[in-house]
Amino acid sequence: MYYPDEVIESVRQGSDIVDVVSQYVKLQRRGANYFGLCPFHNEKSPSFSVTPSKQMYYCFGCGAGGNAITFLMEYENYSFQEAVQTLAERAGIPLPQVEQTEEERRKSNRKQILLEIQKEAARYFYFQLRSEQGKIGYDYLKGRGLQEETIRSFGLGYSLAYSNDLYQYLKKKGYTDDILRDSGLITYEERGIHDKFWNRVMFPIMDINSKVIGFGGRVMGDGKPKYLNSPETMIFDKSRNLYGMHVARRTKKPYFLICEGYMDVISLHQAGFTNAVAALGTAFTIQHGILMKRYTKEVILTFDSDEAGQKAALRALPILKSAGLAVKVLDMKPYKDPDEFLGHLGAEAYQERIDHAMNGFLFEISVLRNEYDFSDPQQKTDFVNACARKLTGFTDEVERTNYIEAVARTYLLDFESLRRKVNAYGAAGYGEQEEREHRYDMAVSVQEEEEKRNKRQQVRQKEKDDANGQAQRLMLTWLSEEPGLFIKIKEFLTPDDFTEPLYHQIAVLLYGQLEAGNLQPGEILNHFINDENEYREAARVFHTKLAETMTEEERTRAFQETIRRMKKNSLDVASRNAQSVEELQKIMQAQSSLKNLHISLN
């Protein structure tokens, strides 16, 4: 459904940003703004600001920002249309209902069509699993111990051993090659068109709203790859979805179980652990962590107990911690994975392992311990030093002391000696990252040093180039903070003087609002909602803090210098593009007159 701009703006204006955000974040008023802990990254001191006058939010820690619509999109993982519909319903604002033909409806919402295709494919695979040709897949699932109810509830299916079976089915349903090309289910090559999945047990992947958005397929036999996943599409983002999340988010347990594979999740759910989830054929991301943080404060890693699983756990730990989650690691030895463990020892024994899961940091130390031979005094000393460097990562004194005690107790180390070592490293500013950088710097060759110098020169040049962009951003901030200044500068600066493409777009919109006497930064953000990077930068423009300690003279001088820098830059750009001598002479005269530029802020 397409909504006109005036309808979207009506919904935005009817949705007070403080009311919307406070349903998810505890806010406290400080002066004209509200502050709270950012829901999009882990922090201990509130840096998440909500500004009623601008109807916007912004985090000075991670840079997340926007209006009421984008807040729901980020927090609830809603589409733009879903966020508008939700806010409209809350505000009691009726949305236009337009009668459309089937074809018009499909053209107006490509995403909805893709969701329909995934749903049709899931139905088709489910039907085939129960056909004579799908018996191989059905027998495989039953052989893995899955009950009929489990197969049904997860919508498991089978893709036939034909190269274009699903394609023919979807074509008969009326879907065109244009849309099927974007579904992730069909492959188009010079040699022909064929299904992405065939001769595989199929695992429908659902988003948190239980809509099918993609598939995973396990090959029958010895084919490669063993597991195949849908490619990313308009509706399928692997970094923002987790397998089983549509069920796990409703769990009453205070933690999630994180697995490596589909079968692990399904086996755990069947055994009563409906809080199990897994990544979708990709490493864990901060977006995965943020998604889980909405529903829980703690996660337990139940990765494979082999070396690969151990490495995967070590990679996931810092990511999950950075999202604000408490992390533990479950020991499944002597069995490899949850599916195998449950098959041998059952759910009760698995719950016992959960109850005794190891603290994430202590798991890291246990892995580190295996690298050292304690019978060698030097290696034991090296282990103590390595532990001390890791322990400097705890900035809270009480927390750091507790972990020093735990490590000392576990590995029979002297507490005071370890504490002094940690404090010494901390006083020297020597954390784990600093140690790695130190070792690297000591090992680099002359050639690498030259490369580093070149890189520093490039950075300095980039900083010089960025100065013009910073001036343009500052001017936009100034105008949004003090719209009364617009009348003083519009004869000196036009939107064309904002040479950075994004800032130029913002300037055009902002100048239009200021001319009309209707400043609405939140409305301007709607124009950049389809590009995350542009949206974040636009939000930063309207939330940059201007220095409040400057004197009036300093403010005037800074304001004039910003205008002078912007004008000089735009004239330099114009001179490079001049088409005639006369045009170049006019530009040079304008450049010369900049020396006499004077603007009073009073």
Image (tube, grey):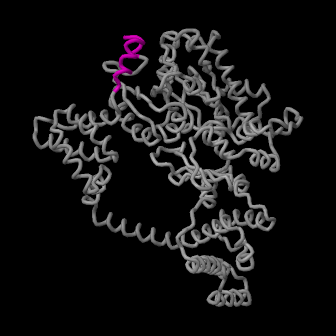
Compare residues 69 and 557 and report the one nearer the observer.
557
Q: Is residue 277 left or right of residue 413?
A: right
Q: Residue at x 45, y 68 (%)?
A: 459
Compare residues 346 and 296 and report the one nearer the observer.
296
Magenta residues, dominant SS class: helix
Placement of the C terminus among the 4 image quadrants:
bottom right
Is residue 482 at all visible to an observer of this figure?
A: yes
Picture layout, residue 267 above or below residue 19: above
Picture layout, residue 515 above or below residue 75: below
Q: Residue at x 22, y 37 (%)?
A: 371
Rendered location of residue 500, percent (x, y): 64, 67
Is residue 343 at all visible to an observer of this figure?
A: no
349 part of magenta stretch: yes
Rendered location of residue 562, percent (x, y): 60, 76
417 part of magenta stretch: no
Write down the quadrant of residue 152 in the picture.
top right
Picture layout, residue 592 above or below residue 551: below
Rendered location of residue 528, percent (x, y): 68, 54
Placement of the N terminus among the 4 image quadrants:
top right
Compare residues 179 and 425 and report the one nearer the observer.
425
Q: Is residue 80 left or right of residue 58?
A: right
Q: Residue at x 60, y 16 (%)?
A: 153
Label tally = 0
Tell me the magenta residue range.
Answer: 340-357
Rendered location of residue 191, percent (x, y): 64, 36
